[in-house]
Amino acid sequence: MHMIKKIAFTASMLLFVLAQLFSFYVITASHKEKIELIREKEGKSFEETVRKFSRQVREIDEDASGKDYLVTHCFRQNMKENSALYKGEEELFNSSPYTFHVAKTDWEKEEYPTASTMEEANGRHLIIFYTEYKNKQMYYVYHALDITSVYDESFLLVAQEMLISVLASFGMAVLLTYLIKKITRPLQAVNEAQRQLIGSMSHELKTPLTAIKGYSETLLGVRLSQEQKERALLYINRESGRLSRLSEKMMELTRLYEPECSIACVESSVEALFEAVEESVKHGLCEKNLTLLTEGEYRGLTKRMDVDLMTGFLINLVNNSAMASEEGGRIFMGADKDSLWVRDEGCGIPPEELEKVRKAFYRVDSSRSRKSGNMGLGLALCEQIASVHQGKMKIESREGVGTKVSIFF
């Protein structure tokens, strides 16, 4: 789960960063383009007003007294607010709160539509347009345009974009977590089940392997009587057989846990299925003097199933019932239109153990189960066979009365 969250968080953060980079690029490009459009439009307007002002100044007599006053008068008539008139570095008129520095002006700069510069003063962003003309005296004209609102709008856009991106990234993280969990949940379940199986199998293998190793070392290094040797060899043989059966069942169970496990379901006769099961278990039941009986409405009944797997399902249940039954007891195998089942009249399962017995390697009575060769895999295998048939396994049991295990299709 922790890994899923890390993957989702990393992916959402990557998307967040990419979204931010793209958004900032768009906002920055838009910001620059807007300023250039303002500069071009206001520059043309500035040139037009300067031309009107220049025409009026040219009509003033060169020798007229108070010429600077008259020039300033013409300037005030034509120029927009936030404009300033300088004679050399002397300020003749300034309708702007901004102080212009004539000496710092780059008069070599040529731009279309007119020379301008960007400045920041008192927390305001300004475009400064400027020009010069000679009429015996050198006059300089300035005009300041406040474009702070463009910067504020851009900042607001960035803030909004950040908020939207954070919310979108959070939503994406939640969605990715959900999707990854949904995709990986079956794999996690399989991985967890296999991990438990491997752990349980390691534990299960430890005891017989230790005993086999011990007996073999004894046979190799200790002088034993013929009877003791035979007893040791019988034990090794019995435990080797149990380990072989365990590995076979583990392979089958592991295969059934695979997500891509596919089964070949065909419409098959339940009666033929029962006959195959009975043929397989009759020898083991005879050894314990147990009787296998059939019941229910199984004659002429067919079900869509994988015959090999369902045969294994019923054989496992019959073997479990045989281990739970007293000598001379009865085991019943039955079917109806909804289910197949095996029931016995054995010792039963305590209520608190009913769910636990479904787990691999779990035994209600460990000592008796080991003695009988039960590995605790039968019901786990049956549970998985039911699952791949899209069915459900149900266990009903009462202590001292018996147990019934059914598969509902």
Image (cartoon, helix red, strand yellow):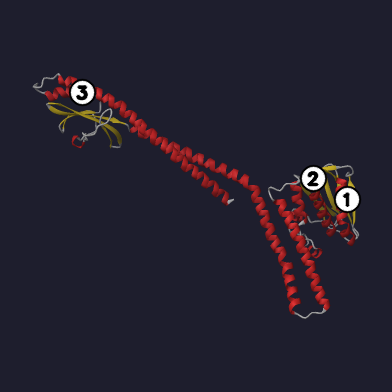
Note whether 45 is above or below 280 in the view shown: above
Kind of residue at disc 2: Met
Task: Give residue 239's position: percent from left, percent from top.
Answer: 77, 66
Q: Is residue 24 left or right of residue 338?
A: left
Badge number at residue 218:
none
Q: CA distance from mark 3 to mark 2?
A: 100 Å
Q: How busy is the neighbourhood of tag 1: few (under 14 within 10 Å), some, or many (20 plus)?
A: few
Tell me the SS state at disc 2. Answer: strand
Confirm or deny contact between disc 3 and disc 2 (CB under 8 A): no
Visible residue check, residue 354:
no
Badge number at residue 275:
1
Q: Residue at x 66, y 57 (%)?
A: 195
Q: Which quadrant holds residue 324?
A: bottom right
Kind of residue at disc 1: Glu
Q: Nearer the viewer, residue 347 or 244?
A: 244
Note whether 364 is above or below 210 in the view shown: above
User: Which residue is the extreme one toward the bottom?
Assistant: 223
Q: CA distance from mark 1 to mark 3?
A: 116 Å
Visible residue check, residue 228:
yes
Q: Which residue is mark 2?
A: 305
Kind of residue at disc 3: Arg
Disc nearer the start of the sequence (1/3): 3
Tell me the SS state at disc 1. Answer: helix
Q: Is residue 8 left or right of residue 326?
A: left
Tell me the SS state at disc 3. Answer: helix
Disc nearer the start of the sequence (1/2): 1
Q: Which residue is mark 3?
A: 76
Q: How busy is the neighbourhood of tag 2: few (under 14 within 10 Å), some, or many (20 plus)?
A: some
Confirm or deny contact between disc 1 and disc 3 (CB under 8 A): no
Disc nearer the start of the sequence (3/2): 3
Task: Give residue 358's position: percent from left, percent from top.
Answer: 75, 54
Q: Is residue 394 left or right of residue 53?
A: right
